[in-house]
Image: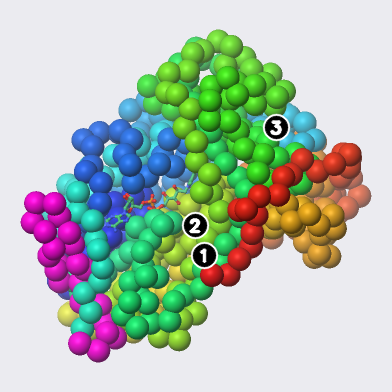
Amino acid sequence: MTDRRWRRAAVVGGGICGLVAARVLADHFEEVVLLERDALPEGAEPRKGVPQARHVHGLLARGSGHLEELFPGLRDELLAAGAPLFDHGDMASTTVWAGTVPRTKVGVPAHAFSRDLLESTLRRRVAALPQVAVRDATPVEGLQWDATATRVDGVVLNRAATGTEVLPADLVVDASGRFSALPDWLEKAGYPRPRTTVVDAGLAYSTQVFEAPPQSFLGLQQMNSAPHNPRGTFVARVEGDRWVVTLFGAGGDHPPKDSDGWLEFAKGLGNPDLDGLIASGSAFSGVHHFSRTENRRTEYAKLARWPDRLIALGDSACAFNPVFGQGMTVAVLEALALGEALTRRRSRCGERGGELGGLARRFQRKVAGIVRLPWLMSISEDLVWHHYREGRTRLPLLLGASNWYKQRLVHLVVHDPQVFRTFLRVYHMLTPPTAMAAPRILAKALFRGVSPKKPQAARVSAGPDARQARR
Ligand SMILES: Cc1cc2nc3c(=O)[nH]c(=O)nc-3n(C[C@H](O)[C@H](O)[C@H](O)COP(=O)(O)OP(=O)(O)OC[C@H]3O[C@@H](n4cnc5c(N)ncnc54)[C@H](O)[C@@H]3O)c2cc1C
């Protein structure tokens, strides 16, 4: 269906979610205006509004496949820009508490690039669509409401050059990220403030970029495990033969912000592949630190009232602890679902597609459904950090049981290629997490899996951000 029936959609935020949403909306609206607060760079450069882009950003195979459908030829374009594409099991070095996983082909592709390269490539593609206008250096300051505040009619902009301006729109999509002001805007219009559930593992990232010669791997991951082993690393060889090296620590055990402390933390991981990379290369970026990594889900779908023509997507609706690399893929899944909802509405209502009334509320429930499993996956480990950081020594029964099972699976991942393959397919969202409890794997975990030895004391520190709060 290519005829565009609705007049204008406004997208707040030009990050990955906003870009993918704009791509999908361009199939349904005569005009899509993408509004970004930052002045956008020409190419793959850092910018203020997405500080997380300094850190390793792995795109899961599920998200990568769907992005290719939306932007045909994207994979080749990224490859041509120097972003390596490889088999995750074969060319990534994976270490977990039970040891380093023997490398083997698993048929799960991993594509490594900087987040700046991905974003700038998508931006160029989206900006080239005839329906899309990208307006950068344009902060959105609020929503434009109808007289009864039951429908959103557009957005209020504030540009340095032109001052305050109202942009009318038939649909407004908020993709302004984990610090979205949408709860404030709703409250200001008389809506109850949506509840935000926060689960914070006290996790922080510190990253340096290296120049280094080729290694035996293109990616490296050393996973932490709650609660005794808070530290880990993600490494990706990205375009320009650069190595992005992210160190992370949960439970308040944060990697340092200075380069000497950073190096010491890296050495402490005891990972020969990482040591070899650092010894053979030189860092040139300085250390970038980021600690706002808490899982944060705003319960828009549970509000008793929801305005017509307003939708919240991506990190604005649900932001994840980044260690599972789910954020970009979930944003893509939500944007695709939005496209499907609009297509359905048009086929039901005929040529003109009818009014958009009611669609936004139903769609917000759909978003809640899409984030449910990734959210559970992300918080299950983080709740363990949370409990120990609160000074508790015993986990609640269910959480304890699921953590026990997970640790035995992690042991199997090192010793059983079939379990490793399934694990990577689940990690890349190609297979549902229930696959890790299929009868054959369940039996292996129960009878052959091993739990980690209990260390003397949990390496967690209590901190002000140790919380699971409802706000
Ligand atoms: C440290 C870290 C590492 C991560 N690693 C991964 C990973 O490996 N894999 C993965 O898939 N995901 C990862 N993520 C998550 C990922 O960055 C996001 O989930 C994903 O980019 C989708 O975000 P978004 O587009 O919704 O928001 P963002 O990327 O935050 O973009 C929001 C945009 O909105 C703009 N904006 C904000 N307010 C306004 C306003 N009022 N008016 C106009 N514009 C506005 C901002 O400037 C920004 O450009 C990581 C996150 C963090 C914090």
Badge 2 marks a residue whose secondary structure is strand
State left or right for residue 303 relative to residue 8.
right
Above or below for 66 versus 145: above
Q: Are marks 1 and 2 in contact (CB under 8 Å)?
A: yes
- Amino acid, disc 3: Thr
- Amino acid, disc 2: Ala
State left or right for residue 102 relative to residue 350.
right
The residue sitting at 34% across, 57% down in the picture is 176
The residue sitting at 38% across, 82% down in the picture is 191
| Towards the viewer: 432 or 457 | 457
Query: What distance separates the C-alpha of mark 3 from that of mark 1?
Result: 30 Å
Rendered location of residue 149, percent (x, y): 27, 84
Q: Start and end of the magenta stretch?
A: 147-168
Rendered location of residue 463, percent (x, y): 66, 50
User: If the image is split into quadrants, where does the C terminus sit?
Assistant: bottom right
Mark 2 residue CB less than 8 A from any atom of ligand 1:
yes
The residue at the far right in this view is: 447
Q: Earlier in the sequence, mark 2 or mark 3?
A: 3
Circle 2 residue: 319
Badge 3 marks a residue whose secondary structure is strand
Disc marking residue 95: 3
Magenta stretch, main secondary structure, is strand
Rendered location of residue 262, percent (x, y): 58, 25
- Amino acid, disc 1: Arg
Badge 1 marks a residue whose secondary structure is strand
Circle 1 residue: 297
Q: Residues within 10 Å of mark 1 (few under 14, many from 20)?
A: many
Q: Earlier in the sequence, mark 3 or mark 1?
A: 3
The residue sitting at 57% across, 41% down in the picture is 204
